[in-house]
Amino acid sequence: MTKLENYINGEMVPPTSGAYLDNYDPSIGEVYSLIPDSDERDVERAVLAAKTAFPGWSNTSAEARHDILMRIVSLIERDLEALALAESVDQGKPVSLARSVDLPRAIANFKFYATAAMHTANESHDSVGQNAINYTLRQPLGVVGCISPWNLPLYLFTWKIAPALAAGCTVVAKPSEVTPMTAYLLSKLCSEAGLPAGVLNIVHGLGPKVGSAIVAHPNVKAISFTGGTKTGEEIARVAAPMFKKLSLELGGKNPNIIFADCNYEEMLATTVRSSFSNQGEICLCGSRIFIERPLYERFKKDFVERVFALKVGDPRESDTDVGAIVSKQHFDKIMSYIDLAKAGGGTILTGGRMSELPALAGGKRHAVDGTSIETSNVRFGEAPLPPAYAGGSDRLGGWFIEPTVIEGLPHDCRTNQEEIFGPVVTIMPFETEDEVLGYANSVRYGLSATVWTENLSRAHRVASKLESGIVWINCWLLRDLRTPFGGMKDSGIGREGGFEALRFFTEEKNVCVKLGN
Ligand code: NAD
């Protein structure tokens, strides 16, 4: 079985402990590779390597940094198919999604920051009357820590390390232990691209061991973290008294607000996507859908019909819409919320169960009304497997959940207040703009929101009143990497994206020069 390795000081190395953790393919529920069970000793080595590499890397010209980062881009492009497949095997997402969203975005992250490094400029202030000039230096912080989650593994990992490297920092990074494979493959590409030893170090392992050792290390000057709100709290508790810079991108419970005057077909198609892309495991998915009363019954019928038609299946099949849930633990969490919703009086309009996949259920999928539809038989393993894949099975025995739509719950129940992070949405009617704003803003989170209306004034009015870091009007997940990205309230602090991220990884210094006579 393939053993992943840490990437420290330019070398692929085993964990100091010699111990490994199981890594599962969630679509078959079986272990297919092993992850280093690293600890603070590996973090110590990685921080030392990064510290040693810092003077050289921070003094490398922006153009040279650009060239190396662009070589990494070329190598990701070369290996795109293998990386997309690896992401799908590791995470459970449809390979089509990895190919069309995750990998292109990882490439875009490197391109964006490789070029941004060459276009940064610092201000100067002519202090007229004081016979002085002030200018701002933005100098790289030193060694920084980047910690990422399992839902968009390479996409979010590179969203952190690309700006850190472009800014001239050296990095100790930790991908999620649930989805470490593409970060491991990336470390090999970084070596091949000629990234100098120690500039990027990747330590695999558990959050409370490896992640917390990175956060607590006195030589790590900043933490860029994406993950759950509870973990963010813990990181802030440790890092804040050490006065580290913190960027925390945390959970969400995003509203999708649909007014009756919307462009119906576009709204419907996009709402299916914004609810169930990546099995609903995108922090920006809209999980609370509010529909203006006159449109409610029509929307409910059409939406449920479209959701029911989604194909849950082998992530490697090109026509699969919804793949596997990332882990057994997360599967159990989502199912427990479905139970909670039922116990709270919610009506399951479609889904609500572990998916009975064709390979397991004899070619039938069941609707909640008891009817069944025939689906094609799915066989696992028709697509070529990535190099690291050593398993193989003719069954899909993993963790699949039918896309689930629930109605009849109040906006303030736990199902509508807590993050589920799976293929589960609720639908609720509303009468007025003020009412729906009250519902939308009633949660502790404030990451993203979607508004559907053709009324221009209303669109802007509602956007300005939503407590949300990002508001999409008549669209979803349209991303321009120049824009500030982040959440309000318990969805985090700080903004990533654009020049914000480069500023985060630098320390500003004002230099005041008194001019001579
Ligand atoms: P998580 O918080 O459990 O883990 C995220 C990372 O933190 C992992 O690498 C983990 O090993 C590490 N970690 C865990 N405990 C740690 C500790 N004590 N110290 C340091 N590091 C530690 O989150 P997850 O389950 O991997 O991801 C899902 C969550 O991420 C959801 O809440 C989702 O909304 C959120 N998310 C947010 C965004 C965003 O941009 N706001 C994007 C994607 C995911």
Image: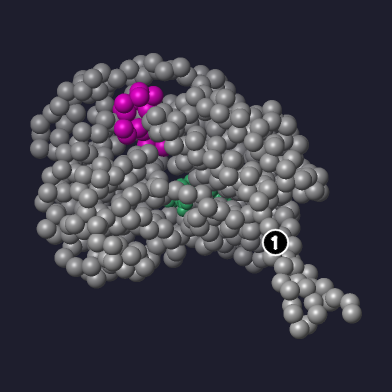
Q: What is the chief secondary structure element of the magenta stretch?
A: loop
Q: Nearer the viewer, residue 307 or 465?
A: 465
Q: Is residue 453 above or below residue 466?
A: above
Q: Nearer the viewer, residue 47 or 31?
A: 47
**In the depicted structure, whether residue 332 falls above or below residue 357:** below
Q: Which of the 4 quarters of the picture holds residue 423?
A: top left
Q: Position of residue 244 (x, y in %)?
A: 66, 62
Residue at the spot of label 1? 122
Picture coordinates of residue 205, whole percent (x, y): 59, 40
- Which secondary structure, mark 1? loop
Residue lying furthest bottom: 129
User: Is 70 rendered above or below residue 61?
Assistant: above
Instruction: Please identify the quarter of the rendering in which residue 273 is found.
Output: top left
Q: Residue at x 64, y 36 (%)?
A: 70
User: Horizontal and vertical percent for residue 13?
Assistant: 70, 31
Residue name at image x 33 percent, y 56 percent: 473
Q: For residue 15: magenta? A: no
Compared with 293, 134 (above or below) is below
The answer to whether 105 appears left or right of 129 in the picture is left
Please state the extent of the stretch shown in magenta in the rendering.
313-328
Can I make out residue 485 in this image? yes
